[in-house]
Amino acid sequence: MWRWADLLEKAGAPDGALMALEFGQSERFTTPIPYEEAKAILGVKGTFQAPIEVPEDAFMQAYERGFESG
C-alpha cells in the first residue's frame, strides 16, 4: 500500500497524473516462477513496465509451471 506522501512524490504535485491498476480473479502460484523464466515464457525482452497481451499458450505454460509441485 502506498501512503499519500509516496503518491505525491511520484506525481510531483497534488494534481499530478498517476495510474492505478486493479487485478481481479487472480490466484497465487504455489511454485513461484523466477523472473527470467517468466520473461522467457511470455517472450518479454526487457522489463515488465506495461500491460502486455499474453497468448493463450504462454498463459497455460506459465499457469501450469506456477502450480507444479516441488
Image (cartoon, grey):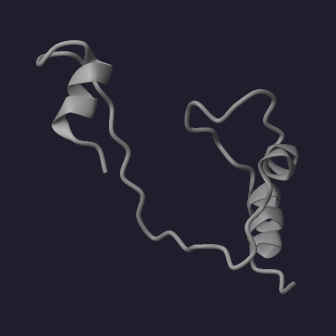
Q: Residue at x 80, y 55 (%)?
A: 34
Where does the image place residue 48, in percent across and percent down from the top left?
64, 35
The answer to which image quadrant residue 19 occupies is top left
**44 left or right, relative to 15:** right
30 vs 62, nearest the viewer: 30
In this rendering, position of residue 55 left or right of residue 11: right
User: Where in the figure is residue 21, as x and y percent of width and height?
Assistant: 38, 44
Question: Relative to residue 68, is residue 51 depicted above or below?
Answer: above
Quarter of the image that includes the C terminus: bottom right
Image quadrant where residue 15 sits: top left
All told, the count of numbered labels is 0
Residue 26 in percent (x, y) is at: 50, 69
Q: Quadrant of residue 7?
A: top left
Q: Which residue is drawn at 83% across and 65% down?
A: 61
- Please tell me which residue lies in front, 62 or 33: 33
**Of the pair 6 and 42, the residue shown nearer to us:** 6
